């Protein structure tokens, strides 16, 4: 659970479950996360073999992040967590 626990890792993984993303795409998709936290979590996910970082040798550098096979196996869990989170938000929404 340490590999995918915390506030930001499930959110990052959820966005990567839709396909490879560049750093800027992830940052745009998760505007609340600081650059430091995004970089830190991406590195941790790479070390845990959940996320793959692919760098193309061009100028400027073209780097993409994608799920590894192990990361792809988490998709059903991430989808279930997202559904639960949306349901929970809906239930907590104040009535007007």
Image: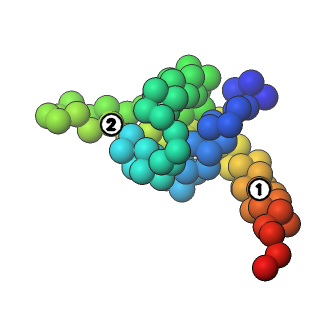
User: Which quadrant of the view contains residue 79?
Assistant: bottom right
Of tags 1 and 2, the one toward the viewer is 1
In the depicted view, which residue is nearer to us: 67 or 79? 79
Q: Residue at x 85, y 66 (%)?
A: 91
Q: Residues within 10 Å of mark 1 (few under 14, many from 20)?
A: few
**Residue 52: percent from left, percent from top:** 48, 33
If the image is split into quadrants, where does the C terminus sit?
Answer: bottom right
Name, please, the residue furthest toward the left: 59
Point out the image quarter for the N terminus: top right
> Which disc number belongs to residue 85?
1
Question: Which residue does the image show at 26% across and 38% down from the upper left?
Answer: 62
Viewer-proximal residue, 67 or 85? 85
Question: Which secondary structure lies at badge 2?
Answer: strand
Q: Is residue 56 left or right of residue 77?
A: left
Which residue occupies the foreground of this view, 32 or 9? 32
Q: Do we see residue 92 in this rendering?
A: yes
Give the percent coordinates (x, y) of residue 15.
55, 50
Callout 1 secondary element:
helix
Which label sits on residue 19? none
For the rendered model, the colour scheme is: rainbow
Q: Dots 1 and 2: beta carbons under 8 Å?
A: no
Image x and y of residue 83, in percent: 76, 61
Image position of 56 (left or right of 91): left
Tell me which residue sits at (51%, 24%) in the image: 40
Q: Identify the residue under disc 2.
A: 63
**Residue found at the very far right of the displayed protein:** 91
């Amino acid at each position: 659970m340490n590999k995918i626990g915390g506030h930001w890792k499930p959110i990052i993984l959820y966005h990567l479950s839709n396909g490879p993303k560049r750093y800027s795409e992830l940052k745009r998709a998760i505007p609340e996360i600081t650059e430091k936290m995004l970089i830190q979590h991406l590195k941790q996910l790479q070390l845990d073999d959940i996320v793959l970082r692919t760098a193309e040798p061009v100028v400027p550098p073209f780097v993409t992040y994608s799920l590894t096979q192990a990361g792809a196996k988490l998709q059903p869990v991430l989808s279930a967590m997202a559904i639960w989170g949306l349901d929970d938000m809906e239930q907590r929404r104040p009535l007007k």
